[in-house]
Amino acid sequence: MKILFNVINSGLGNCGGANTIIKSANTLVDLGHDVTIIDNSKNKNTWTPIKAKHLIIRDIPDIPKSDCIIATSFTTVKSTLKISKILNIPSYHWIRGWELWNMNEKDIINNVLNVPTIKLVNSLNLQKKLKKYNIDSYLVRPGYDLEDIYPKYIRNYKNDNIVLGGLYHGGKHRHTKRTDWILESSKILKQKYGNKIKLYMFGIDKNPNNPVIDKYLSNPNIKDKNDFYNEIDIWLSPSKLEGLHIPPAEAMLTCCPVIGTNAELNGMNDYLIHNETGIVSLDNLNCFIDGIELYICNPKIREIYGKKSFDKIHEIGDRKSNMKKLIEILKMEI
């Protein structure tokens, strides 16, 4: 198939969303498909080399004839509809987040949901969200790098010293990523349990030099991330505005137990199942801290949920198996 991924007015930067598009495009190329990422700016992603074509277009004639076009964010929907009409090809929208940072709720309804794109979503959270507006969607997860992130079997679940882990975000998404929840809960638990509690974090920001953080990794490569996850005993993920949240799933691939909340868009309903693959607290800080303490005081629970979470992510599958599912869906409309 000839597939267009549209990132016009969205772009490719160093973030999970852009990286997912690149890795999905690359996987489709590996599967034998002709994939072009159309853009109106330079590629700024330094994490993953692009195997697909990356084409900066100035006008519609620059766009190669293709079988379909996929919008990749809310800001790319308008141009996707225009291009699909001119090229007479089906238009899809792979919704991978509820982008309140780009549009308010009213504009999302008018300009994203109630337009003639075929909706794909990357998570059960988003599928349920669209259903509230009577919008049907296909579930298309991107899959995971199972060969790159794996358990090194160095974690001692019975160790009295506990390393908490979390994603640090100092930018515009700090509030929805709830970085402050991770810092505050770690501070409280350190005061209660003393120096047996450590906090390790990573992010794209430079080291914030926060005294609560005992180790910080800035913009790590995949090998460093795998080593980092394997050092963590409990992964903290209180995010509240996600599609399919990446870091907790990656932590699970190393058999690290995860705690999240029951926020509507926590981004983990696909794999974090309460009392089965991890702990899901009520959506408030006190309950979140109580859940962390449950892990701290019960090493057996950490071990059981760590192993079950590993199995769950492998059940969801790698990138190739999930991109094959995408192709099956795309072929239905061609």
Image (cartoon, rainbow, N blue to C red):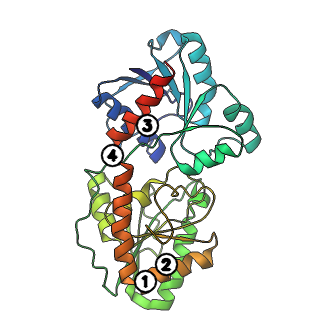
Residue carrying label 1: 296
Neighbourhood count class around disc 2 (C-alpha, 10 Å): few under 14, some 14–19, many 20 upward: many
Q: Is residue 256 visible?
A: no
| Label 4, label 3: how far apart the Cα atoms are | 15 Å
- Callout in the foreground (4, 3): 4
Ranked by sequence position, the earlier of labels 1 and 3 is 3
Given contact means CB atoms under 8 Å apart, are the residues at marks 1 and 4 in contact?
A: no
Q: Is residue 125 visible?
A: yes
Ranked by sequence position, the earlier of labels 1 and 4 is 1
| Label 4, label 2: how far apart the Cα atoms are | 29 Å
Residue carrying label 3: 21
Ranked by sequence position, the earlier of labels 4 and 2 is 2
Can you say which quadrant of the picture contains the N terminus? top left
Neighbourhood count class around disc 1 (C-alpha, 10 Å): few under 14, some 14–19, many 20 upward: many
- Residue displayed at 51% across by 69% down: 274
| Label 2, label 1: how far apart the Cα atoms are | 6 Å
Neighbourhood count class around disc 3 (C-alpha, 10 Å): few under 14, some 14–19, many 20 upward: many
- Between 207 and 132, the residue placed more toward the observer is 132
Ranked by sequence position, the earlier of labels 4 and 3 is 3
Given contact means CB atoms under 8 Å apart, are the residues at marks 2 and 1 in contact?
A: yes
Residue 298, compared with residue 28, is above or below; it is below
Residue carrying label 4: 318
| Label 2, label 3: how far apart the Cα atoms are | 33 Å
Q: Residue most toward the top?
A: 61
- Between 277 and 160, the residue placed more toward the observer is 277
- Callout in the foreground (1, 4): 4
Instruction: Name the amino acid, label 3.
Output: Ile
Which element is circle 3 on?
A: helix
- Callout in the foreground (1, 3): 1
Task: Where is residue 244? Give x, y as percent.
Answer: 50, 50
